Every structure is written in C-alpha cells, then in structure tokens.
Image (tube, helix red, strand yellow):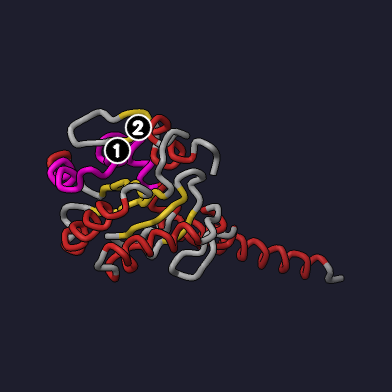
Amino acid sequence: MAANWATELFGPKILTKPKTTGLPTESRFGGKSSKKLVALYFSASWCPPCKGFSPMLLDFYNSCKDDLDIVFVSSDRDEKSFNDYYQKLMPFLATMPAFNSEEARQQHIKMADTFQIKGIPTVIVLDAKTGNFITDNARTEIMKVTDEESKKALVKSWLEKEAVPIDQAEFNTGMSRGPLMKALMFFVNRPVYIFGLYYLIKQGLKYLDELGQDESEGGEL
C-alpha cells in the first residue's frame, strides 16, 4: 500500500471515541505512532459471537497495547447500536460506520471485499507502517492464548511473519487475490452481475452460431 495506506483503507477520518466527528486518519497513523501492528476488528452489536469474543479481544489488547492498535469496523445499522457497543470497546479506534454516509458505506464495502470478509467476528492484522497483510486468522489465535506470556508471544510471532501487499495475500480460503480471484470475488459479491454475464455469453454464442450458418450457406454453389 501507499504511504497513506490508512487513509486509503479507512477513509479521511477515524474515530477515537463514540459520539464524535473523528480526527484525520493520517494524523493518527502518521510516522509519530509507536505501534507496530494494526488489527481490524469486523464486528457488530447484534452478533452473539462478537459479544462473546469482544471481552477476550479487550483483554488481549490491554496486554499488548504497546505494540498494537485495534480498529473497530462496525456492521451496526443505526447510531444508537453503534455508540452503545463502541462504548464497551473503548479504547479501540473505529472507522466511520456505514450508516453515517454514502462515502462511509462504500468504504465499508471496499474493506469487506478487500479482505474477503464472509462473517463476523473477524480480526485482520496488518503492519502498522506499511499496511501490508500479516494474518486473517487472528481471532482463532487470540482465543487460544490465556496468559500474559502467550499473548506477548503471539504478537511477537506476528511481528516475525513476512508482511505482504494485500493484493498478494493468501487468505484463509487458501486462494490468492490474483486477477482471476479478483474477478471471481467481484461476481460472488455482486450476484446480479452473474445474470448479465450469462446473458452476454448466451448472446455471443448465438451470434457465433448464426455466423457459422451464414458461412456454410455462402459456400454452397
């Protein structure tokens, strides 16, 4: 990602607490930050597994906050639900919720597409300086660590992993986001386009069939 990877990914503003208008994303993720990792927490107040996992994530954060920022990416559908839930997730950062504006909604869709989010809760870990991808299996890993030593060892293992550009990442599906995968995910996330593609293919095959018949008839004496 570019130097301003956080603005590109999260949008121009990031929240530091509920019921605020946020601050410039670039100022929060600039060169002055000492954090080495950024974890994206895809979650929502209406999701029972999220409610069960959030206290574990908070506990993990409190043990590792010297190296780690966590950004809450909400799938809540209204302001009250978002604010009430975000209040419990303090001191996490948060992206602008999708219901806030059309720009925020598009940013949320883009993030979900980028990381192939199929369900919540999901935790994605990135390198804080570059925005490069480290792991999308963090939720499972965090649930396995129970003491201070194992939590810090997990963070150390993330720091030792090779961080790769997101478009070269392999997600838990085991499929890299090459051109073919990007095309596939485009249609999976937008099923209405499948019917359009089917129509175009059908019309193309019909045209080729008619063209073949015309050539065949034109060759007869």
Q: Position of residue 130 (x, y in %)?
A: 51, 45
128 to 203, vertically: above or below: above
- The Cα atoms of the two marked residues, 2 and 1, are separated by 7 Å
Can you tell which quarter of the image residue 206 is in?
A: bottom right
Q: Quadrant of the C terminus?
A: bottom right
Q: Secondary structure at mark 1?
A: loop
Asked if the stretch drawn in magenta spans residue 85, the answer is yes
What is the three-letter code of the residue carrying label 1? Met
Marking on residue 13? 2
Which residue is painted at 38% across and 41% down in the image? 107
Which residue is painted at 25% across and 40% down in the image? 99
Marking on residue 96? 1
Q: Quadrant of the N terminus?
A: top right
Characterize the local packing of mark 2: few (<14), some (14-19) or many (20 or more) Cα atoms within 10 angstroms. Answer: many
Q: Which residues are magenta?
A: 81-109
Asked if the stretch drawn in magenta spans residue 36, the answer is no
Q: Position of residue 132 (x, y in %)?
A: 51, 51
Q: Residue furthest front?
A: 149
Residue sitting nearer the eye, 193 or 34: 34
Q: Position of residue 150 (x, y in %)?
A: 32, 67
